[in-house]
Amino acid sequence: MAHGKRYRKQLGKVQRDRAYPAAEAISLIKETASASFDETVELHVLLGVNVRHAEEQLRGTLALPHGLGKDVTVAVFAQGQQARDAEAAGADFVGGDDLAKKVEEEGWTDFDVAIATPQMMGTVGKLGRVLGPQGKMPNPKVGTVTDDVEKAVTESKAGKVEYRTDRQAIVHMSIGKASLEADKLFENFTAVMEEIVRAKPSAAKGRYIVSCTLTTTMGPGIRVDASKIGDRDAAEAATQAAEELATA
């Protein structure tokens, strides 16, 4: 795939054979985010786990300290009082069979998070073909199949995100927008990495974090030195570097 002039220019700022300390990588991410829109900062972590074994798969949720830097759109599959509770909590789309039909027949997925009550899962369960590949299928393990829809909507709106390993044992996550301050991106990054380390399966052997890469929607990948992830003092360096870049 041939890349454009803008991408090649940003790629030239990155040392491809270097793994950067997290704070420095985030400063570089902000410098290489040059699209005409506010790009999403993505984190990709390759883990040394065998995802063919269920006990080595990762899946869970966490609340990012500074959210995603964007409005999270929530769809709730519920009826009756629970539907009214979801609307009161700020859900963007609320419905029952009608909402499910829209997803199934039209392929509609214009939302970031889907929440469903247990009573609706007989209907929502049929939407796996559409929602599954996008990682939007409600799941009780991550709190998106629940009777307490009000709490689930509130947490999702506040920046609660889901993580899980894919078939290649990679965790793909958004940690915010490129416009978010460097120190806040750093804290979101650190929160995710600490959660991944905490969730390490007991069955996993050998090197756990194989590689870690940050990128933006339209920018080049930047390798992160996983051994320096716990360096919280680097947050100040990230902020200072970002300020220098802004005034350069």
Image (tube, rainbow, N blue to C red):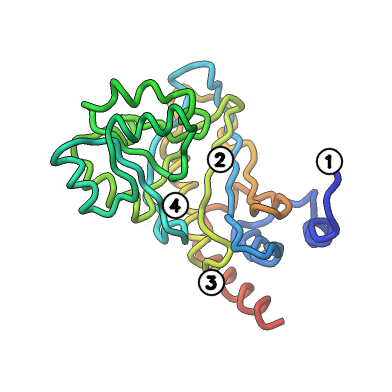
Query: Which residue does the numbered mark 4 point to in the structure image?
Result: 191
Q: Is residue 74 above or below residue 237?
A: above
Q: CA distance from mark 1 to mark 2?
A: 22 Å
Q: CA distance from mark 3 to mark 2?
A: 26 Å
Which marked residue is nearer to the observer: mark 1 or mark 3? 1
Name the image quarter holding the N terminus.
top right
Query: Which amino acid type corresponds to the residue marked 3 in the rendered image?
Result: Glu
Q: Residue furthest left?
A: 81
> In front here: 36 or 243?
36
Which marked residue is nearer to the observer: mark 4 or mark 2? 2
Q: Is residue 180 above or below residue 175?
A: below
Residue 1: mark in rendering:
1
Which percent across, then down, holds residue 216?
A: 64, 54
Query: Which amino acid type corresponds to the residue marked 4 in the rendered image?
Result: Ala
Q: CA distance from mark 4 to mark 2?
A: 14 Å
Q: CA distance from mark 4 to mark 1?
A: 34 Å
Query: Which residue does the numbered mark 3 point to in the structure image?
Result: 236
Q: Which numbered disc flags the more N-terminal residue, 3 or 2? A: 2
Query: Which residue does the numbered mark 2 point to in the structure image?
Result: 172
Which marked residue is nearer to the observer: mark 4 or mark 1? 1
Which percent across, then down, holds residue 84?
A: 18, 46
Which marked residue is nearer to the observer: mark 4 or mark 3? 4
Identify the residue shown where x is 34% and y is 30%: 139
In the drawing, does residue 102 fall left or right of residue 107?
Answer: left
